[in-house]
Image (cartoon, rainbow, N blue to C red):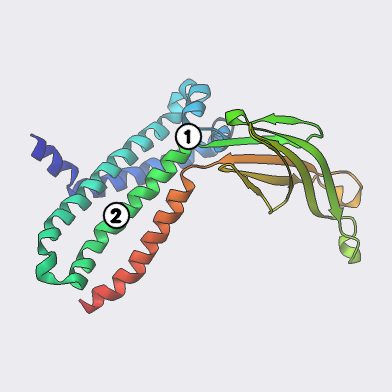
Amino acid sequence: MINKIWNVCGDIKVNFWLIFAISINLAVGAYVIKFNPKLFGPLNHSLVQDWFIQYGQHSLAQSLWLVILFALAFILGINTFVCAAKRMAQLWPQKNQSGLRVFSVKIAPSLIHLCFLLILAGHFTSLIIGYELNVPVQLNQKIVLPQGNSLEVISSHVERYTVPEAFNGAVRQCTVFLKIQSPEKTEIKEISVLHPIYWRGMSIHLDVFIKKNSQQTTALPELKLIIKKDPGVALVILSFAALCLLMFWYFPQRKKT
């Protein structure tokens, strides 16, 4: 029974139909999102489980495709792992007979599939245990963060162009000074647009929203702090880099084998 389940999980035909089903599911999801932007908009700034509790469970007809997508992706992960494991188990006894280079070429596709699994795992980790907070910038505002941390907006500064004349008065850069507090110490840090702060596993970004025609006035732009903690991003980047290196090495070597 166990062998039968193992063989079904490792069937390449199952892999094909899973990918086909995910493609159809994503197409349906894109259609649903297009006509329900208010329902799925908060998903950009929420953990999946929090979004589903607050929004998704009350609109199951519209959110069901997302539940199915996670289920299909999980089954695809199992299928890919079993396929790779079966292939590696078949090749391992041949490593001494075929030689290191030939063996490496044969096993490379399985390693590429495992890298793909790690990328999926990284994305899944970020979706369920990540952290994101969007807060408008207000002076003397204190923002409470996880694990006893907090930050406070001390001051903000807007730099504008003076030359050339065509850009006179337009916003050039926005800077905010933050007092960041942890249970151990307090720090003063400067943040500006495209120059984020990385602190205790979190990234803090400054975003700016300029109203129409505000560049011709002295009105201040609207500033927003985006605070993120993405625990899966390192795994995604490292696995993707390894996948690319393996593929760049594999295809030229395959032609020589």
Left or right of 41 on screen, residue 62: left
- In percent of width and height, residue 94 lies at 10, 64
Residue 27 seen: no
Q: Residues within 10 Å of mark 2 (few under 14, many from 20)?
A: some
Question: Which residue does the numbered mark 2 point to in the structure image?
Answer: 113
- Gap in angstroms between the C-alphas marked 2 and 1: 24 Å
Which corner quadrant of the image does residue 240 belong to? bottom left
Question: Which residue does the numbered mark 1 point to in the structure image?
Answer: 129
Q: Is residue 219 above or below residue 141?
A: below
Foreground disc of the pair 2, 1: 1
Residue 166's tag is: none
Say what amino acid the circle numbered 2 marks.
His
Left or right of 71 on screen, residue 200: right
Which residue reaches farthest front? 184
Q: Does dot 2 land on a helix, a strand or a loop? A: helix
Residue 21 seen: yes
Which corner quadrant of the image does residue 200 belong to? top right
Q: Is residue 156 above or below residue 55?
A: below
Say what amino acid the circle numbered 1 marks.
Ile
- In percent of width and height, residue 107 lies at 22, 62
